[in-house]
Amino acid sequence: MASDFEEGFLVGILVGEGHFGGDGRQPQVTLRMHERHGPLFRWIERTVPGGRLYGPYDHGGRRYFQWMARGPFLREVLLPILDLRLTPEVDAYAYERFATMKAKYRRQLGQLEAPSEAPDPPDPA
């Protein structure tokens, strides 16, 4: 179990550097950073095991690692952390990207029902 600090630190990294999306079939959260951040990726692997680390890759003169969260790890581990810690007050832009990913991949994330909106209050006529 990650501590509150560790969860917050991870969410901060994902807000600043991560991507919330998918490949058309399944949702994924991706973090791509220069190879000099290798120790950070290893910290992520130890702290929230279950994602996949790829690289380092060489592309266009840049060496980078890529960490991906998909499948059961995304649904059961990372999604609850993000649902709790990533709010519009923390970062509206990242929250919107996350919400869009969740809406687009609702079925794959095990969220079969669309979030219900509260009905408008009656008009005090």
Image: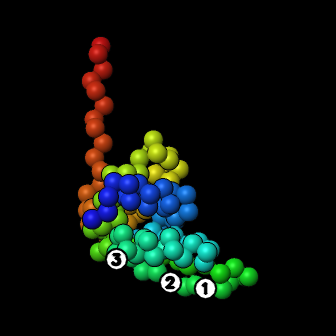
Above or below, 2 relative to 39 = above
**Label 2, on which residue?**
54
Question: Crowding at label 3, few (<14), some or many (≥20) Cα neighbours within 10 Å?
Answer: some
Q: Are marks 2 and 3 in contact (CB under 8 Å)?
A: no
Left or right: 55, with 2 as reference point: right
Residue 28 position in % (x across, y down) = 43, 71
Above or below, 54 relative to 74 = below
* Residue pictured at 61% horizontal, 75% vertical: 36
Q: How many marks can you see?
A: 3
Q: Residue furthest front?
A: 39
Question: Crowding at label 2, few (<14), some or many (≥20) Cα neighbours within 10 Å?
Answer: few
SS for tag 3? loop
Residue closest to the eye, 46 or 10: 46
SS for tag 1? strand
**Label 3, on which residue?**
50
Amino acid carrying mark 3 in the image: Gly
Give the distance between the C-alpha atoms of the residues marked 3 and 1, in whole angstroms.
21 Å
Above or below, 54 relative to 101 = below
Residue closest to the eye, 125 or 83: 83
Give the distance between the C-alpha atoms of the residues marked 1 and 2, in whole angstroms.
8 Å
* Residue pictured at 44% horizontal, 71% vertical: 43
Left or right: 116, with 30 as reference point: left
Give the distance between the C-alpha atoms of the residues marked 2 and 3, in whole angstroms.
13 Å
SS for tag 2? strand
Residue closest to the eye, 97 or 32: 32
**Label 1, on which residue?**
57
* Residue pictured at 66% horizontal, 86% vertical: 58
Q: Are marks 1 and 2 in contact (CB under 8 Å)?
A: yes
Q: Earlier in the sequence, mark 3 or mark 1?
A: 3
Amino acid carrying mark 1 in the image: Tyr
- Residue 119 makes an appearance in the image: yes
